[in-house]
Amino acid sequence: MDKVCGSPESGDTVDVYSYNGSFLARAAYSAHSQLTARCWSFDESEEINEEFFRSRLQRAENAESQSNQNAYFRATI
């Protein structure tokens, strides 16, 4: 990361831009980590709010459910 504009606190959601000002991602900011910005979304129009997290958790739950339906187990003796 080249520079930080403003004074975000750790845990704040920030927008990440390229060197030429193009939007790259919306991310969680962590000043004291090697990963200064952990990306939430690469969609500039997507808001990071309660609905964002509900949707992500629902997608994960659906994927896990689908995975379990397609899983099979083989016991070896």
Image (tube, rainbow, N blue to C red):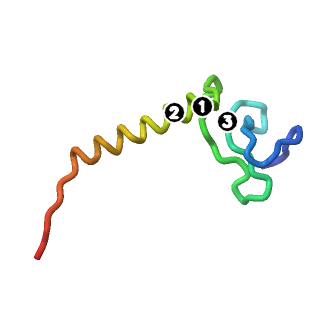
Residue at 60% in and 29% down: 43
Task: From the image, tell me which residue sits under label 1.
Answer: 50
Residue 54's disc is 2
In what element is the residue under mark 3?
Answer: strand
Q: Tell me whether circle 2 and circle 1 mark residues in contact (CB < 8 Å).
A: yes
Q: Can residue 45 be seen in this snapshot? A: yes
The answer to which quarter of the image holds residue 21 is top right
Q: Mark 1 to mark 3: distance in Å?
A: 15 Å
Q: Determine the CA span between mark 2 and mark 1.
A: 6 Å
Q: Cα distance, mark 2 to mark 3? A: 17 Å
Q: Position of residue 36 (x, y in %)?
A: 73, 52
| Helix, strand or loop status at disc 2 | helix
What residue is at 72 percent from the left and 38 percent from the top?
A: 13
The first of marks 1 and 3 along the sequence is 3
Residue 38, placed above or below residue 53: below
Say whether disc 2 or disc 3 marks the residue closer to the N-terminus.
3
Instruction: Tell me the crowding category of disc 2: few under 14, some 14 to 19, or many 20 or more residues within 10 angstroms, Cα based.
Output: few
- Judged left or right of residue 55, residue 50 is right
Quadrant containing the C terminus in the rendered view: bottom left
- Dot 1: within a 10 Å radius of its alpha carbon, few (fewer than 14), some, or many (20 or more) residues? few
| Residue bearing mark 3 | 26
